[in-house]
């Protein structure tokens, strides 16, 4: 052997694993893990020969490595350095290390004790899947999802009520209108985007009251007058302000009369179109309108509202449970009248139980738990609510200065705001305003003054969306604004 009887490490040389980069241990050999497939050995130099005489100079060190104990297929001269980094080791492999020293004459020591070290497995690459959905639906899971190489991820695309899937794009390329898509054996980052389109509601019933068939500017076909009982007809040739569909408002059915329109049970939007084409001052014609026995318009004076020869529409949500929509006109002064009627099935866009939990109302509309709001506070009561069978909707509220923003494809909607005063017991204690898309729709509302305490009070407002969203803002005049529930239907 080439081992000098005098050169050697004093005492027993120990090996120890290092878990960070370079680390020295006194009188020991150690290994450190800097990254996968890279290991650093470090040691303290010997100071004496075996017989105890001082070692004045170490010529260098040789390091050894192999994949079996005592069998070293790799060896390197480290020179006089007291550490050596192996950079070509394989991942997920067990290695055995040792080191020897030699003096300036070339005489070498015996091998140190052996160190065992297993390199870690190579990290599995990860990729990002990014999902987004336009207004009118959702994609699940939304946003960014981190996924390991080789795994799969399925996405579900769900249109909201009144919408259908317009397109699904993966990495910018169309994959059709499927309601689900799966990324299989992922080995790169991807994007998936879903867009939706509003489903045009089919008109269930539309008539030009007292007139001939007519197709309006929006393409709705109004038939000749039918489904009525009683009343007389009248016409004018005067131009009608506030509309491009003058012909619809130039004819009328007037008197004490009614309409009975068969429809399937469900939710509808009823539009009643009026124009005062006879009287030239307020107070000459005053009448009320009922729908399925409930008064929906009380003491209407069209002239007082908009003047003569001017279009005036009233939009009313109707929930049908008896297979028909029955519209009654009763006179207070002179006779009631109507210019045209349109009935459209309602397509639910959004419904939330403000301040409360998920709830399905008596007509089957599913209200989600309070969502899409910014600001405000939640409150509840257990008191019974008059004027409704859906007490739960009115027993919770969002109050304060707050807003709701609901994505909506451009088009026509009916927004129904549901209120009940569950806190104050006198008028004048709560007064507030409501704006939709920046336009004040309800001014200085005092719920108690309208209906008293713990009583349902609904306000329905037609809204035309041109910016892809419906934003409802509540601002205070006295105390704070509030809302019990919000229902938005496609018209």
Image (spheres, grey):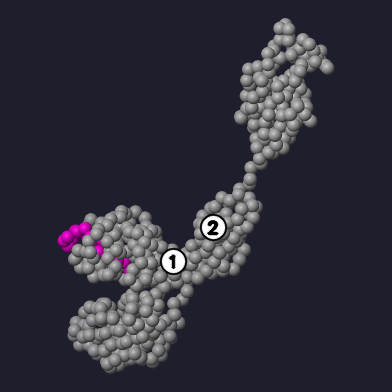
Is 239 left or right of 1, judged from the image as shown? Answer: left
In front here: 8 or 460?
8
Magenta highlight range: 416-435
Q: Which mark is residue 408?
A: 1
Residue found 45% across the figure and 71% down from its top: 162
Residue in front for this viewpoint, 475 or 87 = 87
- The picture places residue 321, in percent across and down from the top left corner, at 33, 78
Camera-nearest residue between 54 and 297: 54
Mark 1 Cα shell of 10 Å, populated few (<14), some (14-19), many (≥20): many
Residue 336 visible in the picture: yes
Question: Residue extending furthest front?
Answer: 69
> As displayed, is residue 151 above or below residue 247?
above
Between the residue at mark 1 and the residue at mark 2, the CA separation in whole angstroms equals: 19 Å
The answer to whether residue 22 is seen in the rendering is: no
Label whose residue precedes the other's in the sequence (1 or 2): 2
Viewer-nearest of discs 1 and 2 = 2
Answer with the quarter of the image where residue 245 lies: bottom left
Q: Which residue is mark 2?
A: 131
Give percent across and percent down for residue 192.
57, 60
Q: Position of residue 410 (x, y in %)?
A: 45, 69
Could you tell me which residue is drawn at 65 percent across and 37 percent down?
Answer: 120
- Report helix, strand or loop for mark 1: loop
Horizontal arrangement in the rendering, residue 144 relative to residue 297 (left or right): right
């Amino acid at each position: 052997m080439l081992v000098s009887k005098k050169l050697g490490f004093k005492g027993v040389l120990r090996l120890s694993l290092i878990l960070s980069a370079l680390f020295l241990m006194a009188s020991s050999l150690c290994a450190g893990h800097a990254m996968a497939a890279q290991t650093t050995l470090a040691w303290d130099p010997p100071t004496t020969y075996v017989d105890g005489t001082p070692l004045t100079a170490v010529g260098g060190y040789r390091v050894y490595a192999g994949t079996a104990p005592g069998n070293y297929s790799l060896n390197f001269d480290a020179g006089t350095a007291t550490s050596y980094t192996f950079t070509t080791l394989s991942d997920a492999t067990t290695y055995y290390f040792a080191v020897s020293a030699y003096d300036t004459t070339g005489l070498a020591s015996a091998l140190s004790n052996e160190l065992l070290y297993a390199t870690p497995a190579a990290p599995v690459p990860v990729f990002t899947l990014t999902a987004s959905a336009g207004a009118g639906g959702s994609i699940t899971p939304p946003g960014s999802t981190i996924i390991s190489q080789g795994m799969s991820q399925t996405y579900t695309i769900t249109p909201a009520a009144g919408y259908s899937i317009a397109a699904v794009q993966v990495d910018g390329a169309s994959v059709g209108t499927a309601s689900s898509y799966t990324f299989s054996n992922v080995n790169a980052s991807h994007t998936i985007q879903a867009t939706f389109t509003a489903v045009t509601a089919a008109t269930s019933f539309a008539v030009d009251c007292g007139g001939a068939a007519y197709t309006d500017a929006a393409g709705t076909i109004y038939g000749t007058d039918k489904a009525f009982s009683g009343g007389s007809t009248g016409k004018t040739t005067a131009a009608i302000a506030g509309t491009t569909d003058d012909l619809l408002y130039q004819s009328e059915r007037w008197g004490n009369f009614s309409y009975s329109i068969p429809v399937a049970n469900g939710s509808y939007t009823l539009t009643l179109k009026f124009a005062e084409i006879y009287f030239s001052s307020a107070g000459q014609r005053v009448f009320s309108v009922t729908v399925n026995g409930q008064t929906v318009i009380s003491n209407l004076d069209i002239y007082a509202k908009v003047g003569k020869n001017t279009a005036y529409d009233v939009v009313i949500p109707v929930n049908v449970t008896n297979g028909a929509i029955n519209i009654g006109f009763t006179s207070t002064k002179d006779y009631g009248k109507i210019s045209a009627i349109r009935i459209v099935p309602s397509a639910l866009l959004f419904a939330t139980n403000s301040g409360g939990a998920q709830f399905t109302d008596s007509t089957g509309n599913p209200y989600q738990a309070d969502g899409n709001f910014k600001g405000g506070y939640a409150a509840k009561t257990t008191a019974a609510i008059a004027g409704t069978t859906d007490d739960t909707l009115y027993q919770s509220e969002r109050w304060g200065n707050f807003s709701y923003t609901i994505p909506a494809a451009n088009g026509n909607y009916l927004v129904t705001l549901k209120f009940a005063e569950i806190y104050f017991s006198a008028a004048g204690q709560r007064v507030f305003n409501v704006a939709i898309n920046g336009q004040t729709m309800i001014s200085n509302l005092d719920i108690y003054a309208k209906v008293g305490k713990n009583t349902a009070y609904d306000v329905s407002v037609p809204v035309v969306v041109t910016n892809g969203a419906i934003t409802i803002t509540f601002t205070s005049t006295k105390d704070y604004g509030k809302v019990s529930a919000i229902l938005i239907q496609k018209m």
